[in-house]
């Protein structure tokens, strides 16, 4: 018997292994990090359709007459604004003004029923957090009941229409849905929830499917999307895709100590609309913010990585890199990080301490690339 | 399991470098296994000619899109040649890590140190784990 804990498997683990993906233990889950090659997969998603197994993510159901009151207290965004079929990005704040996790809140029925989608690595922490601060809602951790497949890319909506158009509770096709809306569709003898959300910067959807039907949906998407260049994508490319968009990743840009305002997430904090856990601390922290999350590009050779110090032109430490990579789309060396506010303007010259060498960089506007989502918007 | 080329007359390290010994001149590279694990290599930091390293000391850095890894000297010695074509285009390392993708040549201080690193049979066992 082994004493080390065995990683959990999503319903698609065997599919990934059969296709020759390289599997790794990611946050306690046995996940594909790469299929054919990170760059190739990255480009597939930017030009065709990328399929991502995101079944490891957590789903919580929040029901009952106290569901809205509870969510208003435990999240920072204004849940009362959500109509049925709408969703928004939000944060779980902690008592000290930091961030427990980031999440998406899906409104099934206003004031009565909501679905929350949280990070895989934080499922237990998050559920304990909501439970501890519950104001009388009925809470169910449904994480193991659901598979989840993200379908992302400039041709993703064509593929989604092929599977789901005509099967919804109205005539609206997936391609006609607005960003951050969701809808139930009949498919394969069951019901899936299709949400026009994602983490790549491309148009597409995240599809919640019952765990037992996940393999069937995965295979059908690959089969019906073959002519659109549909390819499975590993976690490696998922990370470079989100980095090119400057989307935050918990454990990199945000954690238990981050004030939402310094992370550029003030747009999902609604102190005028409501009271919420840690509100006074978050607002006090906002007044004391001395650093800002920025995107930067190296102007000399090298690759920035998480944890590298960011420097002023004079060589003093002014911040820290939270994510970095060579952009598979442009070949540029790009990074995300915190710097002192006076160095945060676009065009500011900074440097990255790469193994003891100050490599020059410039603060620049983000996202780092144009995508089907940004060009359309 | 892939079939890696592992010449019997090469030496190998636990950090997945290979060393081809020709009298006191040692050519150093990374194994196909290492190349495959790293994925697309996009950046290489190699030393200058004349730099001296002890066995096990880091002589450079290799980076894929995803991560940076140190390169370690299989034996002690002085760098006498650096593969310049890789400095310009590190993707050559993915194509042929065992031949044209060599990294540096060093003048070995003592062949006694070769006893501290592996032959093909032991390295094959290491990567089969």
Image (spheres, coloured by chain):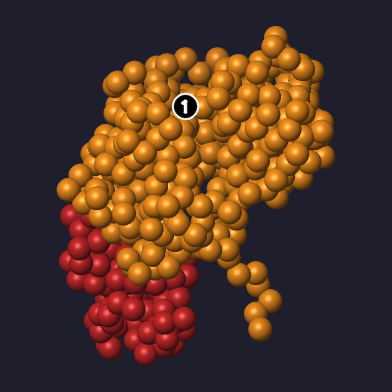
Chain colours: A orange, B red
A33 or B89: which is nearer to us? A33
**Disc 1: host chain:** A
**For residue A275, what is the image quadrant?**
top right
Image quadrant in which the N terminus of chain A is located? bottom right
Vertical placement of A124 versus A250: above or below?
below
- Residue plotted at (44% across, 61% down): A12
Q: Position of residue B49 (x, y in %)?
A: 29, 58
Q: Position of residue A162 (x, y in %)?
A: 27, 41
Give the number of marks: 1
A225 or A318: which is nearer to us? A225
- Residue plotted at (25% across, 67% down): B97
Image quadrant in which the C terminus of chain A is located? top left
Q: Position of residue A369 (x, y in %)?
A: 32, 29
**For residue A155, what is the image quadrant?**
top left
- Residue plotted at (20% across, 71% down): B99
Q: Sort mark 1 into few (<14), some (14-19) or many (20+) by Cα contacts within 10 Å.
A: some
Q: Which residue is mark 1?
A: A180
Q: Position of residue B55 (x, y in %)?
A: 45, 72
Dot 1: element: loop
Q: Is residue A88 visible?
A: no
- Residue plotted at (39% across, 72% down): B16
């Amino acid at each position: 018997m082994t004493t080390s804990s065995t990683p959990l498997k999503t319903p698609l683990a065997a599919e990934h292994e059969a296709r020759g993906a390289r599997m790794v233990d990611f946050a306690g889950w046995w996940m594909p990090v790469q299929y054919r090659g990170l760059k190739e997969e990255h480009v597939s998603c930017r030009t065709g359709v990328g399929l991502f197994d995101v079944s490891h993510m957590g789903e919580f159901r929040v029901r009952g007459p106290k569901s809205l009151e509870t969510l208003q207290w435990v999240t920072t965004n204004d849940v009362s604004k959500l109509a049925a079929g709408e969703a928004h990005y939000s944060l779980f704040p902690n008592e000290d003004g930091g961030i427990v996790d980031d999440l998406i809140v899906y409104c099934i029925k206003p004031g009565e029923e909501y679905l929350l989608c949280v990070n895989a690595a934080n499922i237990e922490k998050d559920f304990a957090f909501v439970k501890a601060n519950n104001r009388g809602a009925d809470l169910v951790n449904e994480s193991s009941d659901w598979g989840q497949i993200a379908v992302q890319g400039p041709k993703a909506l064509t593929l989604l229409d092929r599977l789901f158009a005509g099967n919804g509770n109205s005539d609206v096709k997936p391609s006609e849905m607005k960003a951050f809306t969701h809808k139930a569709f009949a498919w394969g003898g069951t019901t899936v929830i299709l949400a026009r959300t994602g983490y790549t910067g491309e148009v597409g959807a995240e599809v919640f499917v019952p765990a037992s039907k996940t393999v069937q949906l995965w295979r059908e998407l690959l089969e019906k999307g073959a002519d659109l260049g549909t390819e499975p994508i590993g976690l490696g490319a998922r990370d470079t895709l989100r980095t090119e968009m400057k989307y935050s990743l918990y454990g990199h840009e945000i954690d238990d100590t981050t004030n939402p305002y310094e992370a550029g997430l003030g747009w999902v904090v609604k102190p005028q609309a409501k009271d919420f856990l840690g509100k006074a601390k978050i607002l006090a922290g906002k007044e004391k913010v001395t650093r800002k999350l920025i995107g930067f590009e190296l102007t000399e050779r090298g690759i920035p990585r998480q944890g590298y110090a960011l420097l002023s032109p004079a060589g003093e430490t002014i911040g820290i890199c939270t994510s970095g990579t060579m952009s598979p789309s442009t070949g540029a060396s790009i990074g995300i990080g915190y710097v002192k506010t006076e160095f945060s303007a676009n065009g500011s010259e900074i440097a990255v301490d790469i193994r003891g060498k100050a490599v020059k960089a410039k603060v620049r506007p983000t996202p780092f690339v144009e995508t089907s989502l940004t060009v359309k918007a | 399991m892939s079939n890696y080329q592992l010449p019997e007359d090469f030496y190998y390290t636990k950090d997945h470098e290979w060393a081809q010994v020709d009298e006191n001149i040692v050519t150093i590279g990374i194994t196909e296994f290492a190349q495959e694990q790293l994925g697309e290599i996009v950046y290489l930091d190699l030393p200058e000619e004349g730099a001296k390293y002890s066995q096990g000391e880091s002589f450079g850095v290799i980076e894929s899109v995803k991560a940076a890894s140190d390169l370690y000297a299989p034996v002690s010695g002085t760098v006498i040649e650096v593969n310049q074509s890789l400095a310009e285009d590190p993707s050559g390392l993915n194509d042929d890590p065992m031949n044209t993708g060599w990294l540096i040549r060093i003048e070995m201080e003592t062949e006694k140190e070769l006893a501290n690193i592996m032959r093909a049979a032991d390295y094959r066992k290491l990567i089969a784990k």
